[in-house]
Image (spheres, helix red, strand yellow):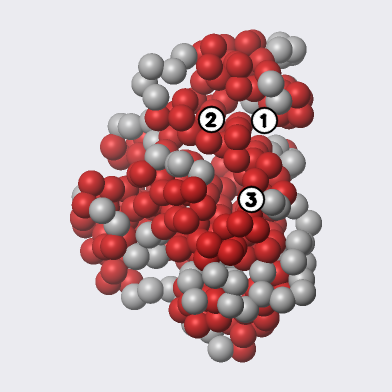
Amino acid sequence: MDTEKSPNVSLSGLLERVEISAISSIKGTVSAILSIINDPGAGFSDLIQLIEVDPPLTAKILRVANSSYYALSRTISDVQQALIWIGSDTLKEIILTQKMSELFQDGTSICGYSRLQLWRHSLAVALFAKTVYRREFGEKGNNAYAAGLMHDIGVIVEDQLLHRDFMLLMQTMESAPQALSVAESSLFGYDHGRVGRALAESWNFPSELTEGIGFHHDPESAGEEHRLFVKAIFIADYLMFEQGYGYVAMPLPEREILQQYVRDLGLQGYALRLIGELVRDELERIEQKGYLSA
Ligand SMILES: [Fe+2]
Ligand SMILES: [Fe+2]
């Protein structure tokens, strides 16, 4: 972790740091699971192969599968059984979630920010976005879950690799609340969306996901084909912040923008309120059971 100096680290310089940091340890598994999610031809064997070459991941999956969270009537002793009993979609989510959670360990708490708060936020946005896709659009929502989980990956990169300045940024935000992207741009010359997009591009994430990460604060800048998807991530991010799953004190964008995106997606206020309640219950369950701790 760099705590020495950081202003004026260019975006490409920051990406070079990522590649030699602990952050890159998740790259292989995360990229592989994203390919499986986005490849209609991928089968069970691809998923099993991916898990079995990663013994710590196998152990975590079996621990999660056997946790009271799933309340299964039998003990799961191998990955194949886990796949059958939990289902491949849930298993994909568990893999992504476990790998991503590795980035949010330890760290400093400052001015209401901590990696744990950011992790809680990311999980909330992932669950919300996925539920919108499943309930409202009748789609699996695997990419929505992935985008939610990773949308603020740029923040964790800044926290880990530009640590001292990131802490200063959090202090500045507390004394003079402003949008995080604005504060980041004036200090670093880029914001966490830009960092996340650069990382997603260099790791060859699918374009839908790259745009979801890169433009979640500015969906109108996303390419036409992914704009509605990015707006869904914006809505999830906005509402989860508003409902207490934020990670930094900052003013939210004007409500009219949110309402416009809600109309663009053809969503109803009551459906979003219901989804908010479902996500809150789910997160409480997750927190109570200790499920998904790394
Ligand atoms: Fe963000
Ligand atoms: Fe966010």
Q: Is residue 289 above or below residue 49?
A: below
Which disc number belongs to residue 32?
2
> Whole-percent x and y of residue 240?
49, 58
Work out whether mark 2 precedes mark 3 in sequence or the reverse, and give the earlier one.
3
Residue 2 located left or right of residue 269 = right
- Residue 279 in sight: no
Q: At x 62% / y 85%, what residue is drawn?
A: 172
Secondary structure at numbered mark 3: helix
Work out whether mark 2 precedes mark 1 in sequence or the reverse, and give the earlier one.
2
- Kindly report which numbered mark, 3 or 1, lies closer to the viewer in this rendering: 3
Q: Amino acid at mark 3?
A: Glu
Mark 2 to mark 1 CA distance (whole Å): 26 Å
Q: Amino acid at mark 1?
A: Tyr
Q: Is residue 27 above or below residue 211?
A: above
User: Are the residues flagged by discs 2 and 3 in contact, CB closer than 8 Å?
Assistant: no
Q: At x 38% / y 74%, what residue is drawn?
A: 253
Secondary structure at numbered mark 1: loop
> Whole-percent x and y of residue 74?
71, 11
Q: Residues within 10 Å of mark 1 (few under 14, many from 20)?
A: some
Cβ of mark 2 under 8 Å from ligand 2: the answer is: no
Instruction: Using the rendered view, name the quadrant where residue 160 is placed.
Output: bottom right
Which disc number belongs to residue 69?
1
Mark 2 to mark 3 CA distance (whole Å): 17 Å
Residue 18 located left or right of residue 76 = left
Q: Nearer the viewer, residue 223 or 227?
A: 223
> Whole-percent x and y of residue 65?
68, 23
Q: At x 60% / y 40%, what residue is drawn?
A: 27
Q: Nearer the viewer, residue 28 or 93?
A: 28
Instruction: Please state, as top left, top right, bottom left or bottom right, where the C terminus lies in the image.
Output: top right
Q: Amino acid at mark 2?
A: Ala
